[in-house]
Image: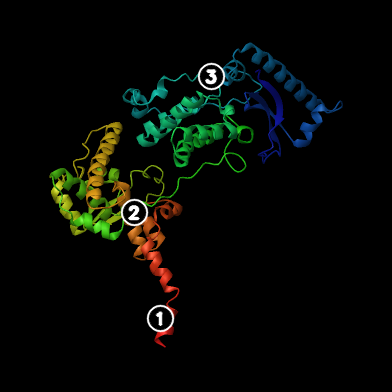
Amino acid sequence: MSATLRIILDTRRMKEKTGTFPVKLRVIYNCLSKDYPTVFDLTDDAFKKLSDKRTTNELQDVREKLKEIEREAGGAIKAIQPFTFSDFENDFISENSLFRVKKQKEKPVTADSLEFDFTPYLKRFPIFTEDHSRPGCISRVFFAYIKKLLQEERIGNALNYQSTFSSIKKFKGNLLFTDITPALLFQYEKWMLSRGCTLGTVGIKLRPLRAIFNEAIAEGLIRREKCYPFGKRKYQLPNSRNTKKAISIDEIGSLYYHKPVCINEQKAKDFWMFCYFANGMNVKDVAYLKYKDIEGEYFVFIRAKTALTTRHDPKPITVYLSEDMKAIIDRWSNKDQNPNNYVFPILELGMTALEQHYCCRSFVKFINDRMKRMGKQLGITRKVTTIVSRHSFSTQLKRSGASTEFIQEALGHTDKKTTENYLDSFENSVKKEFAGMLTSFKNNQIEN
């Protein structure tokens, strides 16, 4: 497929001083388009008059120059085989006096930008060895975004994006953005379901792909109106069913009073209960706690998950240090209480972000494996995991009459809807009790 081009007037933003709009060269290839601003600015009326036989000398001169641009750009496109936007920009646009070429802002050279080493990630992220040379392929944007996440030390997110790309590649290869239509996404969904996945898993896999489309649109690589497959009357991401994750207060009590059979079970139980008492704290946040986060009778910390996205408006979480929590700290904490030292010896100072990620993941598995076993022994039907601790905390607050806003603040959620998803439905016994209240008038009638 050959690239096509045309001269357009970009009327999205008027230049206030002159009342004109920029004249641009639009190049389209594989349904991707890029606009290159020329040195000419015209009013809408003047642009329409360019095609008139009789017009001013000034407009005639502009018309000839624009024809020259079209002619020479067409020749440049034919000479570039296979065509790429970057080659076109280097060969034709960059040194052309008829175009306004934006000077690349020089990024400040920092130690981080010079020294960041992706070597530790090569084995875990096969996208580093992917061929990104095909114009318009999704791996280009996936790769750039994953590198950005790694530099920001958002390892879990980076792994999610790698997983999505690997899944799509296994389905149909390194697709072009223009290949991904609503019909293809429905095919992918069917393919995933045939492999034993749930609709919830499909939604989890495709959310990073939707984000990559939005990233490509923001970068000007694709146009939303041309090849965006998500949304109403297109492909809508399936939502996972909000399954009940909390356990009852009686079940929490049975865990609390349970006598573990070994030191590892005691440790797992203690950290599960610590998460529950500490506002349903995430295990990663438990691992990151430092002695400097203790302020009197409280822990005050920023959630690791939202630390980057809330930098402009940080929302610290304050957790009261109950007697139970203090006892757990006494049993399992680092004895060196240097303010910069971790409270618990889950992580070590000097670890890389990748090492921290796998340490936290390993510790979650340590807790979950033993808590599931204890839960089964106690007759708790639901698997007792760390996420159950978080959901149980929020559910018990809800049933005690706490407002959603209070629970949102306690959990450290930036979005109220996220909190609402955490709040568990009431148990059947409570529903039965409420249903009985609807006919309480019967008892009154009998008494009369």
| Type of the residue with mark 2 | Ala
Marks 1 and 3 close (CB-CB < 8 Å): no
Inter-mark Cα distance, 1 to 3: 77 Å
Q: Earlier in the sequence, mark 2 or mark 3?
A: 3
Disc number for residue 352: none
Residue at (41% x, 71% y) in the render = 436
Q: What residue occupies the far front of the structure in this picture? A: 446
Give the side of residue 342 with respect to residue 184, left or right: left
Inter-mark Cα distance, 2 to 3: 48 Å
Where, by quadrant of the figure, is residue 438 drawn?
A: bottom left
Q: What element does badge 3 sit on?
A: loop
* Above-or-below relation of 226 to 254: above
Q: What residue occupies the far bottom of the structure in this picture? A: 448
Residue 289: tell me if it is visible. no
Where, by quadrant of the figure, is residue 447 drawn?
A: bottom left
Residue 257: tell me if it is visible. yes
Query: For the residues carrying marks 1 and 3, which lies nearer the camera in this image?
Result: 1
